[in-house]
Image: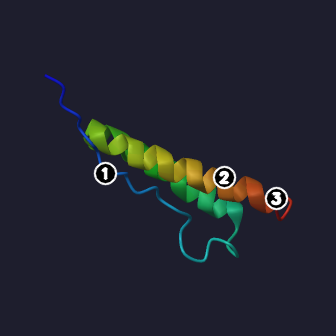
Amino acid sequence: MHAETESAPRPVPGPPPGSQHADPRGAIDHAVAALDELDTLPTAEHVERFETVHTALSVALSSIDKV
């Protein structure tokens, strides 16, 4: 028996509002600080936190050269 399970696409967190003009270091510090709480969260919620940090790092890196 073949059962296909379709999962709805998960939302990908974007940069916080106003991050385009914010200090990239502040955004990175804020995102990384959110990782400090991982040990209090269910494992299923870790992915969202890591994606948020990844997004903050990507935005900060792209803003270095105004790319």
Task: From the viewer's perspective, tell me whether residue 20 is left or right of residue 38.
Answer: right
Toward the viewer: 15 or 6? Answer: 6
What residue sits 45% from the left and 52% below the top?
34
User: Mark 3 = which residue?
Assistant: 64
On residue 58, which mark appears? 2
Q: Quadrant of the N terminus?
A: top left
Q: Amino acid at mark 2?
A: Ser
Label 2 CA crowd tier, 10 Å (few <14, some 14–19, many 20+): some
User: Mark 1 = which residue?
Assistant: 8
Task: From the viewer's perspective, tell me whether residue 51 is left or right of residue 38.
Answer: right
Q: State the CA–CA distance, disc 3 to disc 1.
A: 34 Å
**Is 2 drawn above or below residue 63 in the view shown?**
above
Q: Earlier in the sequence, mark 3 or mark 1?
A: 1
Q: Provide residue 56's location: percent of width, then percent of height.
A: 60, 56
- Looking at this view, name the residue that lies furthest to the left: 1
Secondary structure beneath label 2: helix
Q: Provide residue 6's location: percent of width, then percent of height.
A: 27, 43
How many marks can you see? 3
Q: Provide residue 14's location: percent of width, then percent of height.
A: 52, 62
What residue sits 70% from the left and 68% below the top?
23
- Looking at this view, name the residue that lies furthest to the top: 1
- Looking at this view, name the residue that lies furthest to the right: 65
**Is 2 drawn above or below residue 64 in the view shown?**
above
Q: State the CA–CA distance, disc 3 to disc 2.
A: 10 Å
